[in-house]
Image (cartoon, rainbow, N blue to C red):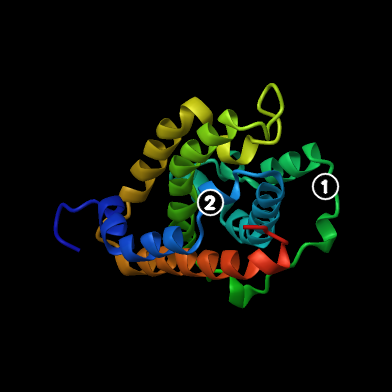
Amino acid sequence: MKPNFKLSDYLKLESRKAHESIEKSFDLLSLVSHHQGYIGVLKAFYSYYRQLEVHLENFTEDFTQVGLDIKTRLKLQLLKKDLLYYEWTNFEDLPRLEDKQLPQVLNFLQAMGVLYVLEGSTLGGQVISWHLKRSKLLGPSGEGGHFFYGYGDKTHEMWNTFKFALNGFSGHNDNIVLNSARETFHTLETWLIQSQKECEIVL
């Protein structure tokens, strides 16, 4: 990485192809435009986040040391809340991903690479949230849309806080973080494509 080049900028540049690939492979806006497709999307993300967030929580103290409260950044309970709103309760029936289907999280740098992708997705989540609000899929107070709404008005503030912590690692094993981010994009893309069958996502 070039001197004085922030790690967040480096990751954005070097993981761009992986990011663009997942957007081409999985058209979220189309999928969340109708009830059955939206429920399938929520189920797919629930399966992916379920075990991955367990791995991230293993580094709770490390996150705290760099000023991040990982507990406030976990999304599984939001997904569960949304699915329950639609009276979907068969969580144990959802596929349990094996470790080989998830990015490797054996150290804190890898955890930061994973979180880079998950936190970055909250920015795009605001676009999805806006479309959901215009649809008739959500409750009168936004019920059923908590996952994509995420941090709401605090999204950019939370993203900037994460980037500040991330950039503290600039120049220190940058490629470990980058490879983890790329692996997260890749495994998420692979799972979302596969889940169109397993989670009954209707196009």
User: Mark 1 sits on what residue?
Assistant: 88
Query: Which percent across, then down, holds residue 151?
Result: 53, 33
Q: Label 1 crowding class (10 Å Cα cut-off): few <14, some 14-19, many 20+?
A: few
Classify residue 195 as left or right of residue 28: right
Report the quarter where the C terminus lies: bottom right
Q: Is residue 11 left or right of residue 94?
A: left
Instruction: Please identify the quarter of the rendering in which residue 193 is found.
Output: bottom right
Residue 176 at least partly seen: yes
Amino acid carrying mark 2 in the image: Leu
| Residue at the image position 46 percent from the left and 69 percent from the top | 183
Location of mark 2 (residue)? 28
Q: Nearer the viewer, residue 185 or 109?
A: 185
Up-down relation of residue 154 to residue 74 (above or below)? above
Q: Position of residue 150 (x, y in %)?
A: 56, 36
User: Is residue 146 found left or right of 27 in the rendered image?
Assistant: right
Q: Residue placed farthest to the bottom in the image?
A: 100
Which quadrant holds the N terminus? bottom left
Percent coordinates x, y for residue 33 in the rendering: 60, 43
Q: Secondary structure at mark 1?
A: loop
Q: Nearer the viewer, residue 67 or 35?
A: 35
From this viewpoint, which residue is outermost toward the top? Answer: 140
Whether 84 is drawn above or below 30: the answer is above
